[in-house]
Image (cartoon, rainbow, N blue to C red):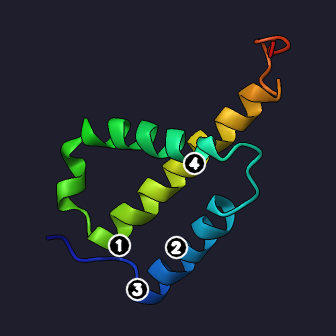
């Protein structure tokens, strides 16, 4: 494995930063599960995870999951340019 250019303190700080975003308020309790499943599907198709330290993989996975959850909320609330108003 290549030499790491970050410290364990860096990992802890990155993890905290992602967790702040990830644990934000959700309007729909189902968003978390849907985001988790979408992230799992995306990440399972890429084999690059095998060379990454587990803690870093977890941080990246949670960051992607956070983006999916926010995208779900944005689409549901009509905050996506070009889509027009989302009908209920």
> Which residue position holds label 1?
55
State the residue at coordinates (73%, 26%).
75
Q: Which residue ends up furthest to the left in the rendered image? A: 1
> Which residue position holds label 3?
7
Quick one: quadrant of the N terminus?
A: bottom left
Q: Earlier in the sequence, mark 3 or mark 4?
A: 3
State the residue at coordinates (51%, 45%).
33
Q: CA distance from mark 4 to mark 1?
A: 20 Å
Marks 1 and 2 close (CB-CB < 8 Å): yes
Secondary structure beneath label 3: loop
Q: Residues within 10 Å of mark 3 (few under 14, many from 20)?
A: few
56 or 85, which lies in front? 85
Q: Earlier in the sequence, mark 2 or mark 4?
A: 2
Q: CA distance from mark 2 to mark 4?
A: 18 Å
Where residue 61 sits, quadrant-wise, is: bottom left
> Which residue position holds label 2?
15
Viewer-nearest of discs 4 and 1? 4
Residue 59, percent from left and from top: 45, 64
Q: Residues within 10 Å of mark 2 (few under 14, many from 20)?
A: some
Left or right? Give the position of 50 relative to 70. left
Residue 6, percent from left and from top: 40, 79
In the image, residue 42 sits, relative to residue 56, either above or below, namely: above
């Amino acid at each position: 494995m290549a030499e790491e250019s970050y410290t364990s303190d860096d990992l802890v700080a990155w993890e905290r930063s992602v967790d702040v975003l990830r644990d934000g308020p959700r309007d729909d309790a189902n968003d978390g599960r849907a985001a988790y499943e979408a992230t799992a599907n995306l990440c399972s198709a890429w084999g690059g995870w095998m060379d990454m330290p587990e803690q870093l993989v977890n941080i990246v996975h949670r960051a992607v999951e956070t983006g999916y959850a926010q995208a779900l909320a944005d689409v549901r609330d009509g905050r996506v340019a070009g889509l027009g108003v989302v009908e209920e």
